[in-house]
Amino acid sequence: MSRIQANLLLLLAAAIWGGGFVAQSTAMKAIGPLWFIGLRFAVATMVVLPFVWMENRRAVKPLTSRNWLLLVLIGITLFGGAATQQLGLLTTTVTNSSFITGLYVVFVPLIAVVFLRRAPHWIIWPAALMALCGIYLLSGGSFSRLTDGDFLTVVCALFWAAQITLAGSAVNETGRPLAISAMQFAVTAVLALAVAAAIEPISIVAIRAALGEILYVGIFSSGLAFALQVIGQRYTTAPQAAIFLSSEALFGASLGALFLGETMGPVGYAGCALMFAAMLAVELVPELVRRRNAAA
């Protein structure tokens, strides 16, 4: 596969994820947020299971009890991220959600600094400041104008960053990325369905009305896009992969405008641009510096 073809696969994955924001928003016209989360991740679990079976056949050693506990913890953080993102979409726009969620790119190294005591790359601090300024501009120049959904989405980005950090450790320990995916999907589905059954109404009519969105997010966002990412990243460079995958936020905003008629003022778009620049800086600068030092 050529690098151009690989980058196109990554671009397609980002577009699918961007479309997922629209599906998540429109689904709640028919079904409660927690029922939607539970059903989408139940579908995602079933999509991934055949690949887990093939992965297990090649496994060298079984998972330990510590591995299983870590996988459950990853599922809990994924549930936290999915729930806060979905609830946030009740009172924020797809555009805001897609860009604020993307800040997990900035939060991941910050978590490593706080909890893992890892020395950060210098770009983390200006990127974090850029991200904060971006949120300020997204609010129109006043944090008081941010909605509850915006704040929930910031919490979502923190959960996403924690999930990525834990998943990275689990992959290094187990070498089973597909098993990790299936387990986190299953834990999220069980938790969401349990809470939904207790607090949200449900009917067959509601499920049918949201079935298209449930299947899209469950099959394509969680299954197909994940596969495209894994394949594409094997045939391109890390900086190029970061650029194409970060375009998820741009696709989310564009599709929100196209299908939902969302708009914002110039200041809001400037905030989106600043957050996007912070995401790219965190992904690209360390890799480019490493490659320059290696070539020196």
Image: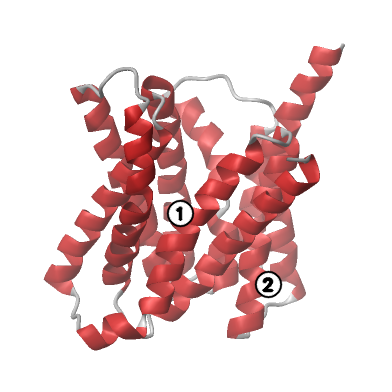
* Furthest-left residue in this view: 198
Q: Is residue 149 above or below residue 263?
A: above
Q: Quadrant of residue 59?
A: top left
User: 57 and 150: which one is in front?
Assistant: 57
Position of residue 139 in the picture relative to residue 202 (left or right): right
Between discs 2 and 1, the one toward the N terminus: 1
Residue 251, horizontal then vertical, whole percent: 66, 65
Q: Quadrant of residue 94?
A: bottom right
Please, what secondary structure does the residue beneath circle 2 have?
A: helix
Q: Which mark is residue 146?
A: none
Residue displayed at 39% across by 66% down? 86
Q: Which mark is residue 223?
A: 1
Residue 51, horizontal then vertical, whole percent: 39, 43
Could you tell me if residue 31 is visible in this image?
Answer: yes
Residue indicated by mark 2: 254
Mark 1, Cα crowd under 10 Å, few <14 / some 14-19 / many 20+, is: some
Residue displayed at 32% across by 64% down? 37
Task: Mark 2 vs mark 1: give the one in front.
Answer: 1
- Residue type at tag 2: Ser
User: 205 and 98: which one is in front?
Assistant: 205
Q: Is residue 89 above or below residue 82?
A: below
Q: Quadrant of residue 271?
A: bottom right
Please, what secondary structure does the residue beneath circle 1 have?
A: helix
* Furthest-bottom residue in this view: 205
Residue 30, horizontal then vertical, whole percent: 34, 85
